[in-house]
Amino acid sequence: METEPEATGERGVPIEVTVAADGDERPSVVDGTRLDVAVDGRLYPTAERRDGSYLAWWFDAGDSPAPESEVTTEWVAAPTRFLAAATLRELWEDPAVFDRLADGAESRP
């Protein structure tokens, strides 16, 4: 039986992994909030979403289109820029984990 987080004092951090198909709605970000974040010596594009969380998307910062571009199809959203970018970096290192998360097959330990 899984214990409820409130009962053990645990708190979760919401991280969202999204993959869009052609024609799917793209995330909405606040204008002028793009900032490239360095993680492990590499830059990742991030921007603030309208809900106050942050988005990192699957491109190198140097040649990154806007997050709402039709060519942008994979995003990580998290409460902070660094968490979104660092999570993206980890998933970039192991695309199989990204695929499992995006498919909803990853379960909580």
Image (tube, rainbow, N blue to C red):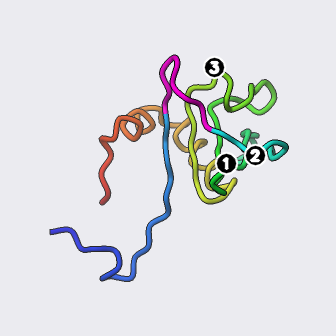
- Please report contact status of discs 2 and 1: CB closer than 8 Å, yes or no: yes
What range of the chain is rendered magenta? 19-27
**Residue under circle 1?**
49
- Disc with the residue nearer the chain's start (2 vs 1): 2
Q: Secondary structure at mark 3?
A: loop
Amino acid under disc 1: Arg
Amino acid under disc 2: Val
Measuring 33% from the left and 46% from the top, which residue is drawn there? 106
Residue at mark 2 to residue at mark 3: CA–CA distance:
18 Å
Left or right of 26 on screen, residue 13 = left
Question: On the image, which quarter does residue 8 sit in?
Answer: bottom left
Left or right of 22 on screen, residue 5 = left
Amino acid under disc 3: Glu
Q: Which quadrant of the rendered structure holds the C terminus?
A: bottom left
Percent x, y of residue 25: 55, 29
**Residue under circle 3?**
70
Residue at mark 1 to residue at mark 3: CA–CA distance:
17 Å
Looking at the rendered structure, which numbered label has been put on residue 30?
A: 2
- Disc with the residue nearer the chain's start (1 vs 3): 1
Residue 4 higher or lower than 95, as above or below = below
Going by the picture, which residue comes out furthest to the right? Answer: 32
26 in the magenta segment: yes
